[in-house]
Amino acid sequence: MSEKQEKNETLVDTPRTIKEVDEKDVVVSAPSGISTIIREFKRDKTALVAAILLIVIFLTIIIWSFFISKETVTSVSIMDQYLTPGTDGHLLGTDEQGRDIVSMLIASARNSLMIAFMITLIGQFFGIIIGTVTGYFRGIVDTIIMRIIDFWTVLPFLMIIIVLVSIVTKYNEWTLIWIIGLFSWQGTTRLIRSKVLSEADRDYVRASKTSGSSNFMIIFREILPNLASIIIVDSTLTFAGNIGIETTLSFLGFGLPNGTPSLGTMISAATDPDVLSSKPYVWAPAALLIIVITVGISFVGQVLRRTADARQRLG
């Protein structure tokens, strides 16, 4: 027997430790989520800049909003009406009621982002629960729920929201959040259901069933962790969409209650032809902020989507 054959037999019979693994050996392992995200951001410089910009904007809004009282934002001063930027300490000027644009912008962004975040949270919670149940159990449960979603999806939800907002008594921010949340779970349900349908047929789920694990443990311990990347991507893009819905409703006058600052309300000042043409400092900052946030989230969402796809290919 040659020396080479003896060496090969020794390698087969005796497990090697990590130190004994030759540098030329190819070791294949599933990529970690953080390392994949960092790699994708390094490749996409635009998304990296967008992510940094979003972090700065969000931190600025959150921290600055703690130093702004509601009375400061909503107090009316007719004598300070339409002051130009830089006048009397108003960095971006004042609006038609003499309110400081910078304070209004921070308070409005805080409200709009908070509402969009809560709507996303509600939509993701119900979407994940319903999508997992329908995809895992299938059968009559899946058929009934999917037919309800088909009916729910074709409804003109924006018009229905406007009607509900108009007829509901004791209307406030939380009322608006729950009304919009009623129409924000269908897309997530469809996405989660399709992924659970494929995951439920995999070997690790069958092995868990064979070992006697309960359906609850299989769903929450085995399946849902594998859907984390999909859920993060969907939550990010849904959050951007919910910002647009809230600002659209506020622009039309069916969003936040009167007296509550919103980015949509600030932009609605542009419906006045004089303000639109000669006083852009009243509405342009809010419009610019919405564009920067939604476009930035879109770039970051694309990176997260590629990360999820890479993990599915290599994991």
Image: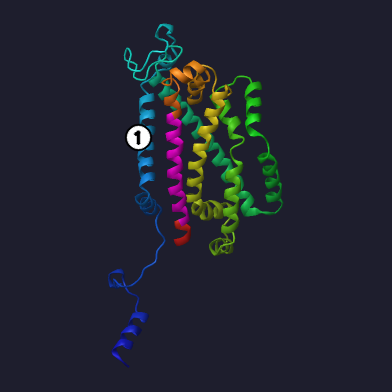
**Magenta highlight on residue 301:** yes
Expressed as whole percent of the image width and height from the top left, the position of residue 77 reads 42, 8
**Dot 1: element:** helix
**Magenta highlight on residue 166:** no
Mainly helix, strand or loop, the magenta region? helix
Q: Which residues are magenta?
A: 288-309
Q: How is the image coloured?
A: rainbow
Question: Residue at 35% across / 42% down in the picture?
Answer: 49
Q: Is residue 124 visible?
A: yes
Expressed as whole percent of the image width and height from the top left, the position of residue 266 reads 48, 22
Question: Residue at 34% across / 19% down in the picture?
Answer: 91
47, above or below 60, in the image = below
Q: Nearer the viewer, residue 268 or 297?
A: 268
Q: Nearer the viewer, residue 178 or 251?
A: 251
Location of mark 1 (residue): 56
**In the image, 239: left or right of 9?**
right
Of all residues, the one furthest to the bottom in this rendering is 1
Total label count?
1
245, above or below 309, in the image = above
Q: Nearer the viewer, residue 64 or 253?
A: 253
